[in-house]
Image: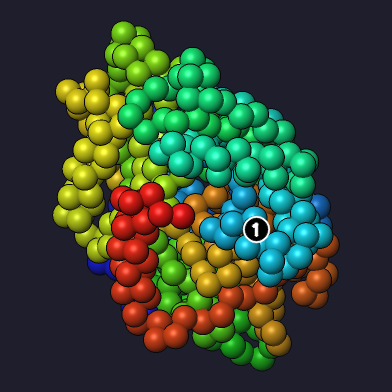
Amino acid sequence: MKNIYHSDIYQFNTPVSSYWEDHSSENLNLDKLNKDISSEIVVIGGGYTGLSCAINLIENHNLEVILVEAGKIGWGASSRNAGFCCLPPSKMSFKKMQSIYGNDETKKFFKNSVEGSNYTRDIIQEYNIDCDVTGDSNYVVAHHPSKFKDIKEQATAYREEFGIETEIYSKEDFDKIGHGGTEQFGAFSYKPGFAINPLKFVNGIAKYALSKQLKIFEHTKVDKIDKDKGTYILRTKEGSIRSKKIVVATNGFYQEGLIPEMNSRILPVISNIIVTRALTEQEIDQHNFKTFSPIANTKNLLYYYRKLPDNRILFGTRGDLSGSDQSNLNMSKKMEKFLKDIFPKWKDINIDYNWRGLIALSQKLTPSIGKIDNEEIYYGFGYNGVGVSAAPWTGKQLSKLVLSNSKELDISKIYKGLPKKFIFPQLRTFYFRLAVWFYAIKDRFNIN
């Protein structure tokens, strides 16, 4: 099974060196599969989607479930994302969505997106997870004066068409409650929304799952799936699992070749993050960075950033096209310049952390939830970088599919079904490279 990026990004035995790892001391130290076993259902992927699906199958339906994870629990995006609980999980504009699917289906999609954000908040409380929740909304910031009109229109549509609570801020108003800087020309907020420590969140879900007697095997990578007498055999290096049903919850780290029907449909995209040293209150005041709520700007190759509880600034963007450790380092240097261009009074602030992970895009530009035709294989992926709100909710929906043995769910059809395969899938990174160049030009010249 060939991966499309450098092997450095697929080192499953090594946790990514991140701020979250240094500020989340928990290590579950779970077993590795080393024998042949069986289970009614196997979930592949120990992140938000897989854990949520497994918990719902056990807790609501009393089914026998085993979960396997190639690294440690949450090794993928679930432990290394920026911790933004935002919406919607789509790279498609709401206008485009309305033109393709119609107003009613688009409203249902946004309704489901809000349900996802609320579900994440609910399980934090229900599972008693201490994951450093901060902020009470999300902000979208106009990075150029010409973009303020666009975000006012977006805020109005969110409020009037989708029932989402929004508020619009002029440049001067947002400087008082958000931040200043060279790329702040007004903003709007929407609720629900907040920020978390993603590693504490995924570990908290895993601990709750273990309390419900979920069997979890870490460092257990599924290399091959065979069929035998109406069952599946999932083969790993040191053991196998015979199962009637499989749930695939690997998102951007899906291994091409594992399931033929899923191959060539996912475009993993590298997202990079840097974190500064802790800033003093005087340094924070230099750019009046007041809010702890997560922020994204209006660039096509967006910047996303937030103030952490210890007064560090987390800053992320896309653009690494290789996946090697060296390319990550090179990208972190570019990002440091981006950050300091926006906040020039922090030009002497050191960067303490840099890391990256994979988000999953597809030609649908929205998540995919469903069941493979004529197989007992279920899938949920493609959150477009919005997995904190979308993935746990998706796991819950998958549990309903697995139980009902059908392809029907009472959710927006925008979520349902597999995306189209990429033409010449070996060129997916080339396609993305072209897209990055194209959107970089649009951002540079503020072209809509």
Say left or right for 256 vs 247.
left
Q: What residue did someone put label 1 on?
A: 95
Say if residue 247 shows up in the picture: no
Above or below, comparing residue 233 to residue 238 in the picture: below
Drawn side of residue 268 relative to residue 133, left or right: left
* Residue 44 position (above or below residue 29): below
Q: Which quadrant: the N terminus? A: bottom left
Residues 83 and 20: in front is 83
Q: How is the image coloured?
A: rainbow
Identify the residue at image location x=51%, y=69%.
362
In the image as oriented, which residue stretches furthest toward the bottom? 229
Q: Quadrant of residue 442?
A: bottom left
Seen from the viewer's position, the closer of residues 235 and 75 is 75
Q: Answer whether residue 84 is visible to the viewer in this image.
A: yes
Q: Residue at x 49, y 48 (%)?
A: 78
Residue 226 lies, in percent from the top left, at 54, 86
Q: Secondary structure at mark 1?
A: helix
Residue 274 falls in which quadrant of the image?
A: top left
Q: Residue at x 27, y 39 (%)?
A: 338
- Amino acid at pointer 1: Lys
Q: Is residue 275 left or right of residue 35?
A: left
Mark 1 packing: few (<14 Cα in 10 Å), some, or many (20+)? few
Q: In the figure, 353 relative to 348: above or below?
A: below
